[in-house]
Image (cartoon, grey):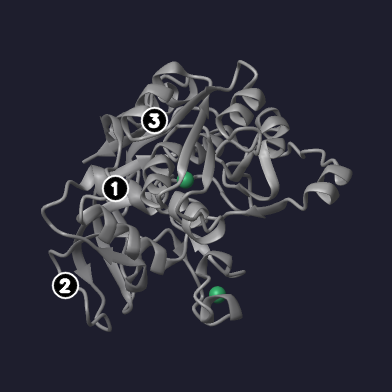
Amino acid sequence: MKAMVLREYQRPMEWVDTDTPRIGPDEILLQVKACGICQTDLKIYKGEIPPPIVTLPHTPGHEVAGVVVDVGKEVRAIQKGDVGMLYIYVACRECGACLEGHENLCPNLKRVGFELPGGYAEYVRVPAYAFCPFDKRLPFEEMAILTDAVATSYHAIVTLADVKLGQSVLIVGAGGLGIHGVQIAKLTGAQVIVADRKEDALRLAERFGADVLVDSGKGPLEAIREATRGKGVDAVIECVGAKETLSWSLPSLRKGGKLIIVGYVPGQPFPLDTMAMHYNEWDIKGSRLCTKAELLQVIRLVEKGAIKPVISKRFPLEKANEALKELSLGGTVGRMVLTA
Ligand SMILES: [Zn+2]
Ligand SMILES: [Zn+2]
C-alpha cells in the first residue's frame, strides 16, 4: 500500500510503498477513505510530541473513516464492506479506568496516529473494538472528523462542563474543534460566546449560532463581562490552551465557574493566581478526547442532523504536506481533510 511517512521532524513526509498491514484474529483492516487533519499532527510533524509517544518513521492521522476490507477470524459483529470510523484510543479494556468506561484515561492506551500508525495511508489495522459504524449514506470526509474535532468538544461541554439550559459558555478558539463546540453548546440551550482572533472564524461561528462574537485581540475580558452583564460565564471551553488566552479566559468565569482545558501548548506552563482561585472557587479541569460511548452518541447526533461537521478544505492523501503547510500558516476555518 501507499502511505505518508515522516522520517525526520520538520521535513516533508514521503508518499511511499510499504507493506499493507496483516491483521490479527481480533483485528480489522480498514481502507481509509478520509482522514482529518488536526493541530496535533502539526505538533507531531514539528517534533513536539517526541518518543516514546511518537517514534520515527511515523505515519500520522487520527481522524480516520473508511471501509472494512478484511476481518480477523475471531471478529463476530463486523463484516467486510461495513463503513465506520476509528475510536482513536486503543485501550487495554482491563484497567480500572477502562472498566469504568473512561477509556480515554487508560494508562495502557495506544493511539491511532500517535503510538500506532495512522490514517495518512491507504489502509489501517486496528482491533475490532476501535471500529464505530455509521450510516453508509453520510460522506466519509465529514464523518472522519467526529472522532476528535466533534467528540472532543462534546466531552468537554456536555460531560465535563455539564452546561445547562440558560447558562453561558465561552468558547476560546473557533477552529476545527471550537466550531463544533459552538454547535454542541447551542444544543444545550446555553448562551454561546465565541472568542477568536480571526474575523472569518468568528463569522463562521455566527453562522453556526454563536450569540456573541469576541475579538480576542481587542480587550476580550471586558467584552465577555459586558455580554454576561458583569457576572462572568458559567463555563470556559479553552480550545487554545495558551498562556495568552488563559490570562483572560480564566478570569472571565463567574464565581464557581468551570474552565475546561482542551487545547494545549507543549512546554508552556500557565501561572495560577492562587488567591483568585480561593476567592472565586473556580473549577479547572483537563479534557482528553472522549470516551467511546460519547463518540457513539456524537455519531447519532450527526446522523440526525443536529450537528454539521464543518470541512474547510479537502486534499488527496498524497498532498498531506501541502495540507499541513496550510494549517501551519493558519489559513483555514473548519477542519481540513485528506481524502482517498
Ligand atoms: Zn487531534
Ligand atoms: Zn485500560
**Position in image of residue 226 (x %, y %):** 60, 27
The mark that comes first in sequence, 3 or 2, is: 2
Q: Amino acid at mark 2?
A: Gln
Mark 3 belongs to which amino acid? Ala
Towards the viewer: 67 or 58: 67
Name above or below for residue 50 compared with residue 204. below
**Residue 45 visible here:** yes
Q: Residues within 10 Å of mark 1 (few under 14, many from 20)?
A: many
Position of 59 compared to 256: left or right? Answer: left
Q: Which residue is pictured at 69% across the width and 27% down the height?
A: 244
In the picture, the quarter occupied by the C terminus is: top left
Residue at horizontal 73%, vertical 39%?
A: 267
Q: Position of 47 compared to 186: left or right?
A: right
Q: Is residue 3 above or below residue 333?
A: below
In primary-sequence order, the first of circles 2 and 1 is 2
Mark 1, ligand 1, within 8 Å: the answer is no
Q: Position of residue 136 (x, y in %)?
A: 13, 57
Q: Indicate left or right for 165 with 278 as reference.
A: left
Residue under numbered circle 2: 79
The residue located at (53%, 76%) in the rendering is: 98
Q: CA distance from mark 2 to mark 1?
A: 28 Å
- Of callouts 3 and 1, the N-terminal one: 3
Q: Which residue is mark 1?
A: 307
Mark 2 element type: loop
Instruction: Depth check: give the residue in front, 325 or 252.
Output: 252
Say the numbered circle drawn on residue 205.
3
- Image coordinates of residue 242 in percent, x first then y, are 66, 33
